[in-house]
């Protein structure tokens, strides 16, 4: 179908479109400028010019899952595996705190070495030392009881990308033992417990069609998450998908703008993957409505080992230690970097 300017304005005003309209919007670059300017208007209404800086601590790259796209998949025997100790994690937080950060995101592969007890101990230690900080976990699929125990220990946010809301695509990206229904159940469990929940997906993943992306948008409408993380798929040599093309910068940026218009309140990161595929990727993401960046607080010695995809950006600008540069970068994009707790704004 042919789109008009009015369709884009309809998305801005009503926050949704018909399936046909979404599909048309996803497959043309004709409205990208208008989409981005409306998305920027909405983010300024909701969040002003603030961009929240979160400290990311990638504390283990051991993973029991064997996702076909991911460099730290269990089947990648070339990956050099590491785990941070509790003390190392706490020292990352200390450094982040001294840089002004008031949110710590603890991310890892699905690593059974870290029992619920250990996770709760780490979370409650951070919570006791830094009661003014938000603790975000991103450690994969767990039982509702486990999620509840982390919440009781002080975690308040949880990131778990759904990866693909279309069952057919989910199966193509994951081994048979991984189930989309289980992943979705996790997201609803997390919401019910009271977490601020983040879902998300890769853009341009192998086999992904526009219809698959439409399923992602519809699933997100059902879940109504507080955070949505998207980034381009990026190839990794030691995966079965090594020969697939990277996802596109323009489609990722277009989707960020669409998501900002659909979910005015959402916290949308300009992801590391976006800054990896293009030098100005993060800036374009911010200008399309993204309002979060998550620089890496992990020790420099392990940073390269959290190797999800090739050339993962761990340069100076990415690293938390160079937060001055990151702040300058955010200002140069037209926004104001802030390190405060930055809760979701649903008013
Ligand atoms: N390219 C881009 N993103 C990837 N992720 C994993 N592997 C890749 C890849 N090859 C994303 C997944 C996961 C998040 C931590 O990183 O969406 O949820």
Image: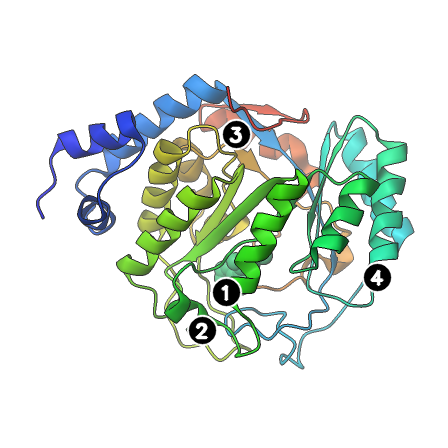
Image x and y of residue 206, in percent: 38, 69
Residue 36 against residue 314 in the figure, above or below: above
Picture coordinates of residue 33, whole percent (x, y): 24, 33
In space, the residues marked 1 and 2 are separated at their CA atoms by 8 Å
Q: Residues within 10 Å of mark 4 (few under 14, many from 20)?
A: few
Q: Is mark 4 within 8 Å of ligand 1?
A: no
Residue picked out by circle 3: 330
- Mark 2 or mark 3, which is nearer the start of the sequence? 2
Whether tag 1 and tag 2 are in contact, CB under 8 A, the answer is yes
Nearer to us of marks 3 and 2 is: 2
Q: Label 1: state its secondary structure.
A: helix
Disc 4 versus disc 2: distance between alpha carbons?
Answer: 28 Å
Give me the residue at 84% from left, 61% from top: 115
Q: Of helix, strand and loop, which one carries label 3?
A: helix
**SS assignment at label 4:** loop
Name the residue nearer the viewer: 133 or 143. Answer: 143
What's the residue at 33%, 39% (across, down)? 258
Left or right, 19 with respect to 275, comes to left
The answer as to whether callout 3 falls within 8 Å of ligand 1 is no
CA gap, disc 3 and disc 4 = 38 Å
Query: Horizontal placement of 189 versus 205: left or right?
Result: right
Q: Give the Cα separation between the discs numbered 1 and 4.
A: 24 Å
* 1 or 3: tag closer to the N-terminus: 1
Residue where numbered disc 4 is placed: 115
Residue drawn at x 45%, y 73% is 171
Q: Which residue is mark 1?
A: 180
Q: Are marks 4 and 2 in contact (CB under 8 Å)?
A: no
Secondary element type, mark 2: helix
Q: Tell me the residue that label 2 is attached to.
A: 171
Viewer-closest of 306 and 221: 221
């Amino acid at each position: 179908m042919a789109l008009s300017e009015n369709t884009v304005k309809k998305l801005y005003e009503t926050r949704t479109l018909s399936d046909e309209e979404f599909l048309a919007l996803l497959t043309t670059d004709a409205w990208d400028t208008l989409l981005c300017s409306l998305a920027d208007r909405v983010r300024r209404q909701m969040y002003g010019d603030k961009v929240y800086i979160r400290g990311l601590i990638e504390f283990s790259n051991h993973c029991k899952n064997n996702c076909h796209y991911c460099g730290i998949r269990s089947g990648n025997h070339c990956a050099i595996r590491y785990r941070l100790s509790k003390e190392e994690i706490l020292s990352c937080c200390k450094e982040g705190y001294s840089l002004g950060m008031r949110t710590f995101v603890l991310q890892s592969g699905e690593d059974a070495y870290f029992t619920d007890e250990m996770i709760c101990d780490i979370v409650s230690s951070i919570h006791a030392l830094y009661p003014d900080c938000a603790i975000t976990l991103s450690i994969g699929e767990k039982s509702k009881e486990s999620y509840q125990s982390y919440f009781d220990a002080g975690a308040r946010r949880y990131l778990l990308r759904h990866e693909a809301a279309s069952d057919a695509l989910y199966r193509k990206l994951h081994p048979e033992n991984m189930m989309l229904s289980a992943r979705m159940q996790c997201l609803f469990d997390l919401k019910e417990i009271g977490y601020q929940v983040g879902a998300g997906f890769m853009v341009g993943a192998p086999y992904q069609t526009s219809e698959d992306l439409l399923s992602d948008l519809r699933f997100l409408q059902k879940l109504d998450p507080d955070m949505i993380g998207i980034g381009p798929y990026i190839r990794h040599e030691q995966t079965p998908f090594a020969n697939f093309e990277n996802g596109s910068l323009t489609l990722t940026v277009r989707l960020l703008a669409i998501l900002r218009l659909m979910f005015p309140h959402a916290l949308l990161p300009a992801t590391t993957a976006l800054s990896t595929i293009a030098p100005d990727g993060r800036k374009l993401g911010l200008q399309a409505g993204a309002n979060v960046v998550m620089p890496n607080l992990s020790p420099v010695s392990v940073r390269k080992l959290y190797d999800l995809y090739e050339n993962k950006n761990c340069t100076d600008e990415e690293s938390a230690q160079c937060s001055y540069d990151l702040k300058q970068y955010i200002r140069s994009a037209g926004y104001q970097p802030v390190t405060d707790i930055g809760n979701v704004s649903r008013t």
